[in-house]
Each structure stands twice: as structure tokens, then as C-alpha cells.
Amino acid sequence: MKKIKKIAVLTSGGDAPGMNAAIRSVVRTCAYYRIDCIGVFRGYQGLIEGDFVPMSARSVSSIINKGGTMLKSARSNEFRTEAGRKKAYDNLIAAEIDGLILIGGDGSFTGGLIFNKEYNFPLIGIPGTIDNDIFGTDYTIGYDTALNTVVEVIDKIRDTASSHNRLFFVEVMGRDAGFIALNAGIGAGAEEILIPEENLGLERLLDSLKRSKRAGKSSSIVVIAEGDKLGKNVFELRDYVEEHLPEYDVRVSVLGHMQRGGAPSCFDRVLASRLGVKAVELLLDGHSNLMVGIVNTKIESCPIEEALKGHHEINKELIRVSDIMSV
Ligand code: ATP
């Protein structure tokens, strides 16, 4: 086994608040163990183009509080090709890099595994995505910040909803996973929460809204994950509800990219710092193809392959709590 003397770190896929804190942690852990650290700009595309920068403990000063990623992120179609991955490998070897730390989501990990199978290049994954949809960790970096952002915005929307007796449909991120919708929905006191994992059905939505009118509620918030399976987008859903419940004046708010931005929460900064240390230490101990994560408050690791195969299930108890709260 080759001794690890130089590690490269990159951020890939969608950016998430806390990625900077993870980069900082990787760089400073390398400095602590007196090994070299290289930053790769623009994810896999930067790997292919050799867009590298040496990083010292001081080069990551004052980034722990910043959203986004100082190394930039990118989606690289070239890395999906054998030729692209060959260029990436040649650049890593030319720069005498012995191990790679990937901060990203499941797409980035899939690419990493393929690369490892071809070149047996040591790598460790750190889960960074606001969606929290990765198996093998209770929380991904960025999720907690996104939740807090969504709750803050819904609180503001509620001011308008209650002043005008309106029903608001708020669409939040989550193409395949309802973690943000479910938790932010409970935190913001939503009437109904529509998520991809549970098909509430249009009839039940109408019944619930009728019930809340009868219960004396004059305004309501419905939180909808973008990947909800009702078969209608949020605007079609508004038209449908207005057609069947004309007493409601429905407004739509699509939160979009604001959910990705902003200063990371303390939780995300601490999580990122812990995961970065673990990722470097695993590489130094000769491990590869592992993803670090937090399980029951402890920092653990699992094979990336397992993380990709498994499914991070939504907590059914939260669905029950949400139902009870909308009585
Ligand atoms: P998020 O879901 O939070 O946006 P992600 O890491 O899942 O993050 P993707 O865009 O799916 O984001 O993947 C990031 C990059 O990983 C892709 O642009 C591509 O370069 C690489 N990648 C993804 N899938 C593969 C694959 N099957 N083979 C090679 N590379 C891949």
C-alpha cells in the first residue's frame, strides 16, 4: 500500500452550505498530519483540466461562515466518458496526488466509484447536498441550513397568508426526497405537507382543506416537495383547488435556489468539520471507497457502494406528527 503524502479535495454536483467548512476541515487536517493538500476547482471538470491549487491551513481562513463552495462546483459530462476519466487520472498522477476526497451527492459518488474501479485510485466521499437523500448518514452537509432557510421564509409568507385569509402553496426543493418539505413543514406549522414518498391523493388534500375551513382556520400553508407525485405541478394544483374549493384564494410561492444559499448553520459547520477530519484519517489509514457520515450522533463510515444502493427512508413518525398537528 502506497503511503499517502498528498490529498486532493473537490466539490461536485449541486452546491450546499457547509461545503466550505468541509474543505477547510480537510485542508487543516492535512496540515495537522503534515501532508500536502491540493484543491481542485470545478469538481470533476477541474480534475480533467488540471485546474489545481495548493492549499495551506491559512488559505481556508474565514470561509467557515460562507455559503457555496470556494472551489466552485460543476457538472461534468466529460467525466462520464472513459477518455475524460483517463485525463483526470493522468493529471492526478502528474501532480503526485495519492488520494482524493469528494464532497458531493450520489451522482458524484457514482462517478467516483467508476473512476476507482478503472484506476484503483483511493478516494473517500463526504455527503454534501441540501436534499438529505443519502443512505448511510442521518444528515448531509447543507440540509440543516436549508431547513432553517425554508422555515424562515414560510414564517414570512404566513404573515401575508393570515393578513389576507389566503391559502399558500409553497414549493420547496426535493425531487426524490421529502426531507426538507416534511421537517420544514412541521417546523413552520404547515397545514398539509406533500412529499414524493407518500401519495396523499387529490381527494384527501381537498378534504383536509375543507376540514380546516370548518375548524375555523382562515389561512393555511401547504408545503409541497418539487418531486411530489400528485401528477400536477404546483400551479396546476392551485387551479385544481380553486376550481373545487372556490372559497379559497390560493397563492403559489416557489422557493427555488434561495434554499441552497446563505451562511451555514452551526450544525452544518460542526458536521462538516467532523466529517472532514474523518475523511482524511480514513485515507491515511489506507481506506478507500468509503463515505463518511453521522449515525446516531457518531461519525461513522460505510462503503460508497452501500450508500448508493440503500435508500434513506423518511421517518413515518414525522408524518403522524404532522397529521396530528393539522387537526
Ligand atoms: P446533487 O444531487 O446534490 O446535485 P450530485 O453529486 O448527485 O449532487 P450530479 O450532477 O448527479 O450531482 O453528479 C455530479 C457529477 O458527477 C456529474 O456532473 C458527473 O461529472 C459525475 N457523475 C455522475 N454520474 C456519473 C456516472 N454515472 N459516471 C461518471 N460520472 C458521473
Image: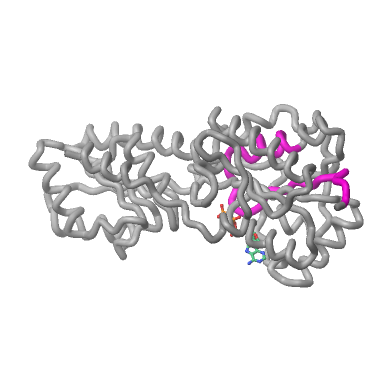
Q: Residue at x 74, y 59 (%)?
A: 45
- Give the x, y percent position of residue 75: 65, 59
Span of residues in magenta: 2-26
The reply, left or right, for residue 80 in relation to residue 252 is right
The reply, left or right, for residue 43 in relation to residue 271 is right
Q: Residue at x 69, y 47 (%)?
A: 72
Residue 25 in the magenta stretch? The answer is yes
- Count of labels in the image: 0
Choose between 216 and 87: the one closer to the eye: 87
The quadrant of the picture occupied by the C terminus is: top left
Choose between 75 and 308: the one closer to the eye: 308
Q: 122 above or below 276?
A: below
Residue farthest to the bottom?
82
Residue 12 in the magenta stretch? The answer is yes
- Give the x, y percent position of residue 62: 70, 27
Q: 11 above or below 110?
A: above
Q: Residue at x 70, y 35 (%)?
A: 277
The reply, left or right, for residue 249 in relation to residue 15 is left
Quadrant of the rendered image containing residue 112: bottom right
The image quadrant in which ligand 1 is located = bottom right
- Give the x, y percent position of residue 235: 31, 57
The reply, left or right, for residue 98 in relation to residue 248 is right
- Give the x, y percent position of residue 250: 23, 48
Choose between 159 and 174: the one closer to the eye: 174
Q: Residue at x 80, y 33 (%)?
A: 59
